Image: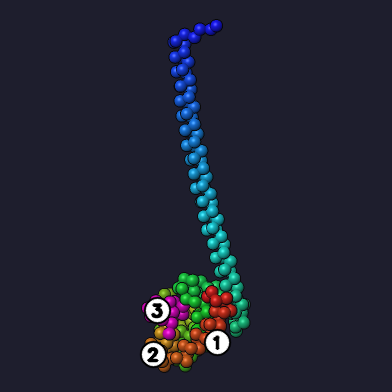
Amino acid sequence: MTVILKDDHEEAIRKIKKRSFKIHILGICFTFLLSLFLMYGKVILKIEKDLAKQSYKVVKGHVIDMRAKFKLLEIIRTKPMSIGQALEVADVVFEESKHREIPISMVLAIINQESSYRNSAVSERGARGLMQLMPGTWNQYMDDPKLKKEIENSHIPTLNIRAGMAYLGDLIKKEKDWNKVLSIYVSGNKDIASNQVYIKQVFNKAKEYSEELDGRW
């Protein structure tokens, strides 16, 4: 029979406790690392999901924009202008619409009412181009000194539309009411009653264009 000495017994106990302590510490560390890994994994997963959602929104936005631009081009292509002019006009109208928060349908309706899309149109009062800008309005929005001097440039479709939409943008910011904006645009004053026919015609046409653009613009 083997006799276990007291010192040997106590030493064995100490080793067992020490080993147990190490195992316990390792267990805690492992649990902590596992929890950290799982938490990190959840964070990564959330980031990936957020990125996926954001990417989807961006792609969806581009698709919607492309579809809207295509429909806009389809409308403009039926008007009396070349393919090149139609492409340029569609790009400018779309760009300025987003930049100035002006409905595309409203811009198209105003062009339709003002010039019937005839770029060479000149009114008795001297208004010119697609959006029938008066020389004073043209000069106000064209910063280039050369453009200010050469009124004929107001017949360049893209420049005419940029100036016209800049004017509309300023008016809607100031008046907050399309009835007043249209009244000022056509006559220079806010007398809605005297310009009711024009205003009604523009709104009706804008509604038609909005339906053609799926109601989004």
Tell me, yes or no, if residue 155 can be seen here: no
Q: Is residue 178 left or right of residue 112?
A: left
The mark nearer the N terminus, 1 or 3, is: 1
Measured Cα–Cα span from mark 2 to mark 1: 24 Å
Measured Cα–Cα span from mark 2 to mark 3: 15 Å
Residue drawn 48% across the image and 88% down it: 200
Q: Residues within 10 Å of mark 1 (few under 14, many from 20)?
A: some
Magenta stretch, main secondary structure, is helix
Q: Is residue 124 above or below residue 138?
A: below
- Secondary element at tag 2: loop
Q: Position of residue 78 (x, y in %)?
A: 62, 82
Question: Splitting the image into 4 quarters, where does residue 65 fall?
Answer: bottom right
Residue drawn 52% across the image and 86% down it: 204
Residue drawn 47% across the image and 13% down it: 9
Decide which of 172, 84 is in the foreground and name it: 172
Range of residues picked out in magenta? 164-179
Indicate yes or no whether the magenta region holds residue 113.
no
The mark nearer the N terminus, 2 or 3, is: 3
Q: Position of residue 41 (x, y in %)?
A: 52, 45
Decide which of 204, 186 is in the foreground and name it: 204
Residue denoted by label 1: 116
Q: Nearer the viewer, mark 2 or mark 1?
A: 2
Image disc number at residue 191: 2
Image disc number at residue 176: 3
